[in-house]
Amino acid sequence: MAYDKFWATNEKLNKTEVAKLDKDGLRILDDIPEYADKGFASIPKDQWDLFKWAGLYLQRPKEDGYFMMRVNVPSGILSKAQVEALAGIARDYGRGVFDITTRQAVQFHWLEIGQIPDIFNRLEAVGLSSVGACGDITRNIVGNPIAGIDPNELFDTSGIVKEVFEFFQNNEDFSNLPRKYKMSISTNLHNASNAEINCISFTPAVKSINGEEKQGFHLKIGGGLSARPFLAQTLDVFIEPERTLEVAIAVTTIFRDYGYREKRHLARLKFLMADWGPEKFLAKIQEYTGPLPTKGEEPVGEWNAGYFYGVHNQKQEGLKFLGFNVPVGRLDADEVFELARISDKYGNGEIRTCNSQNLIIPNVREEHVDALLAEPIFERITIKPNSFIGHAVSCTGIEYCNLALVETKERMRSIAVVLDEKIQLDVPVRMHMVGCPNSCGQRQIADIGLQGMKVRNANKEMVEAYEIYVGGTLNAGGEFNEKLKGKIPAEDLTGVLLKLLTYFKEEKHAGESFYDFKHRVGLTAIQEALDSILGLGSHGVSV
């Protein structure tokens, strides 16, 4: 259906919005074959940003002409053919780099414009797409990575995710949103999809309607991270599964037509939701859908942060799923081919990606588990990782990303390795590192969040440094971590974290989580401990 861009007359539109009125982002797909034929130099600079709608970003430095590609993996579910196609792209075009993101997608690097048409063809042949993985459009839909096999899900959401994802794919009615738009759909009772940090989330709910117990969703609206993070708010509505797409269309239409387009840094759905509030937003939804039942009950348990390590029973009798650690989400192409072989030999060929940057091999018969785990690849990619590397998350960082200010992925990995060698705790500590305020590594929800920046040292030189944030969670509706004062030079970060975690070990109660510890002793006590580590008298900086 056609729709009116009634914001087109607004004289205060930001420059990106003006450009989108002239050319829809999806139209870059029409141009890519010509650019591929003529080479990178043929692409006008004013078209570079439109490549996001095709799932492509120019990596650092832009002028070199190499692209990062993000491939959608709805709910993180991949068939053997899809895994092998992705591994082949990484091997043939991406210098072997295969990254799992915090939204269950797959990222490649080092791609050249002349390779993109063949990559698109390979993806299409196995039912995958990078379209909409970036840009002002519906992104990859995060879901339950064990949908359909999960003993702790209310019902299987894989079909619903597929229906919603396919509706928005290549749909020009919804390809010009005010900003990126992130959705999650899951009934995992442990919030594996991190519902509170998405623009729109469908979460597990039950309600008695006309004497019949119904299973369905509650609706959370307005989550998001970046420099001004918001937790999603729950609306007073119960959504039956068959109405999921209808409600998703209504919310997306509201964002498209009423979202803010003047200041790009204030354009996410979270700002509209914060201004309107849940009652007004729900009333607007029902203008599109008609009346919806009020909310029911939420059968939720402890948040699992997307971690599924170990061997677990599936719903299906006699079958297991195995959760593996992928250190900071990075694999190489040969490993991915090997994982595809193993998953086919011992399971049904599927591999599933998690928003913790890890993976799952499902549908393994109980009698085959030991043989699978004896495969040499599982010395590195293990079901029993050391605690810190097993709970370390990182964005791409300055290695490839134009927005990043500092190195992240390798630094987070190396820090975790040292911490695992030096200190043992009786609880995991989730550590997330980000290279800029955009927070692709989701540092706000970590026990310890590390955010990079550039600062001047005593010699007036610009150096990489990090701020430390403590106490994030998505339990009980969620709470973002809080910043400690002090900017830590990159070269000192490992030692500072070791001392801070030693303080935690010495002062914590047995079995006490980092989040509970932070609330028991208070932010001031942790700040004082950091000041002592840094040799500062009163919340200064170490650079």
Image (cartoon, rainbow, N blue to C red):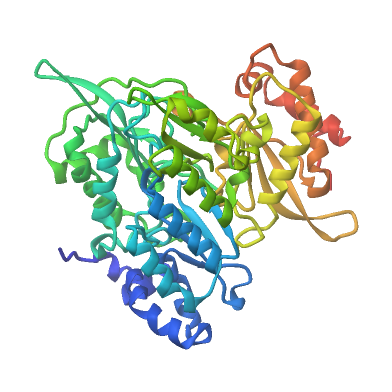
> Vertically, is 358 above or below 218?
below
Q: Image point 90% across, 58% down: which residue?
A: 459
Q: Residue at x 32, y 22 (%)?
A: 298
Residue lying at the far top of the rendered structure? 510
- Report the side of 458 relative to 481 (left or right): right
Question: Compared with residue 360, is residue 17 higher up or lower down, i.e. above or below?
Answer: below
The answer to whether residue 477 is above or below residue 10 is above
Q: Quadrant of residue 160?
A: top left
Provide residue 303's location: percent of width, then percent of height: 47, 26
Residue displayed at 33% across by 20% down? 299
Q: In the rendered image, is residue 231 in sight?
A: no
> x, y percentage for residue 438?
55, 52
Give 261 or 312, whichever is nearer the viewer.
312
Q: Quadrant of residue 327?
A: top right
Q: Quadrant of the N terminus?
A: bottom left
Provide residue 244's location: percent of width, then percent of height.
Answer: 22, 40
Q: Which residue is most to the left?
A: 210
